[in-house]
Image (cartoon, helix red, strand yellow):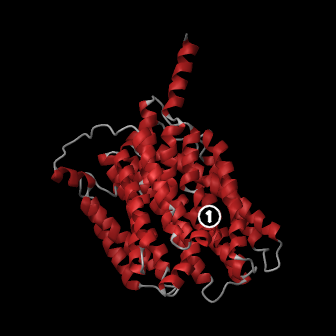
Amino acid sequence: MSSLKSGEIQAGQAKAFSWRFVTPLFLGSALNPINSSLIATALVPIAGALHVTVGRTAVLVAGLYLASAVAQPTAGKLADEFGPRKIFLTGISIVFLGGVLGSLAQNLPTLVVARVLIGIGTSAGYPSAMLLIRRRATGAGMSAPPGGVLGGLSISGNVTVAIGPPIGGVLVGWLGWQAAFLVNIPFALAALAMTLRWIPRDDPATGSRRLREILARIDLPGIVGFGGTMTALLVFLLSLPRPDWLALVIAVVAGAALIWWELRVSTPFFDVRRLVSNGALTRTYLRSALMLLGVYTVLYGLTQWMQAGRGLSSEQAGLLILPMGAVAAFVIRPVSKRNLVRSPLTVAALCMLAASVVILFLDSHSPVVLIVGVTVVFGITVGTTSSGNQTALYAQAPADQLGTASGLFRTFSYLGSIASSTITGIVFSSGVTDQGLYTLAFVLIGVSALVLLMVVTDRQLKVPLSDKQRNTA
């Protein structure tokens, strides 16, 4: 009887996370990373069509970065308050509008607005999905979802960034630069239809529905302050190597005001006390930022070197990056099914360290197979770090703030990606050379060594936090 009952429970848990439930969540989570890299192949055609310099089109990349860095935790906070399904549907609808607007745009300012809309809309995908998965697992009597679910979310939320450039190259070559925006329309419509059909409605909201109390709970001043701080900080980072000191001053002042405010409100948007007290979660944020700094440095820095230093075409360079995404997707599934944390993060740091050392031996005459070897090893890095950090996030984030915590997790990831573009821009400012590539390799060696030290010395990575520990963290 007990075995029969156990089998019924397992069957019910498997049904709770059927493909119908997870497919729209994976699709919605993939839109942000794909859009962040897809635009790379459309910048030159956009510049030609709109009669602007290629340098001016860089605002399309920065616009999505800025919008996403601010909107990710905001969407998570709103999902915590109003329900993840509502916020997920709202975000997908905004993505649809951005795709339509961008495909019809006739000037650069309109394209910037479209990219900001896409950044805001796609930012709802990951934090809403994490919260939906958490509530689904709780409803099914599970302390954690099946590892394959978090693994699929890791693939859609992180690995897909590597397939953006090659896919973008094909679509832009076939349909023109508008394809970078048109691609969002069918995916948004599909995600909307599947969510409306297969994702159950949110439970009735608790607490007062009066506007004043709602605004107090979501901490609107905190959201505005966080947005201002992040915007100023990212403007400063993007201005390097010619620093915009005014932006840095604004970031420091706004950040100080934000901390002062958040320490005084009862339901802070950016919970400073909890962030300080929950050291395990804070370190997960930092690890994610550092590892993605390394991954994006390879994704963009190595790609630039392959074209300008090694003499490969953009199509060839894109194909050589593809193994990174393929290997990462292959690695994530078996790792995530076991809900491991420490061991995959250790492997990620070691692989990143080894591949960074190999970059020191590349030059303009290096065989293609050696370059592929580097991207394959970095693929292992992407897969293991994505799975390990996401599992750590799920275990360490407070259950009542998982949406906000997941959004902040992605914000730190964007900080890492922007830092990588800043470093690459500084190193290659006077030309893409072998020596510049070696400088990037030394940066990567330092970053991977730091991450390895963080993993080895972090005792809280030995086992995931229990539900009781997570709720009281």
Disc 1 marks which amino acid? Ile
Q: Left or right: 80 with respect to 299?
A: left
Q: Which residue appears farthest toward the top when viewing the image?
A: 1
Q: Which of the image's four quarters has the N terminus?
A: top right
Disc 1 is placed on an element classified as: helix
Q: Residues within 10 Å of mark 1 (few under 14, many from 20)?
A: many
Q: Quadrant of residue 369?
A: bottom right
**Where residue 271 sits in the image (x, y, percent)?**
34, 55
Q: Left or right: 394 with respect to 401?
A: right
Q: Which of the image's four quarters has the C terminus?
A: top left
Q: Identify the residue at horizontal 59%, vertical 49% (top origin).
A: 387
Q: Is residue 470 visible?
A: no
**Where residue 370 sits in the image (x, y, percent)?**
80, 68
Q: Is residue 329 visible?
A: yes
Q: Nearer the viewer, residue 286 or 90?
A: 90
Q: Nearer the viewer, residue 164 or 333?
A: 164
Relative to 246, does residue 206 appear above or below in the rendering? above
Q: Nearer the viewer, residue 10 or 253?
A: 10
Relative to 307, does residue 220 appear above or below in the rendering? above
How many numbered marks does the figure carry? 1
Q: Quadrant of residue 358?
A: bottom right
**Where residue 76 sits in the image (x, y, percent)?**
38, 53
**Where residue 91 sits in the image (x, y, percent)?**
38, 56
Q: Which residue appears farthest toward the bottom when viewing the image?
A: 430
Q: Identify the residue at horizontal 23%, vertical 56% (top origin).
A: 265
Q: Identify the residue at horizontal 44%, vertical 36% (top origin).
A: 136
Q: What residue did someone put label 1 on?
A: 167
Q: Nearer the viewer, residue 343 or 422?
A: 422
Q: Identify the residue at horizontal 69%, vertical 65% (top origin).
A: 321
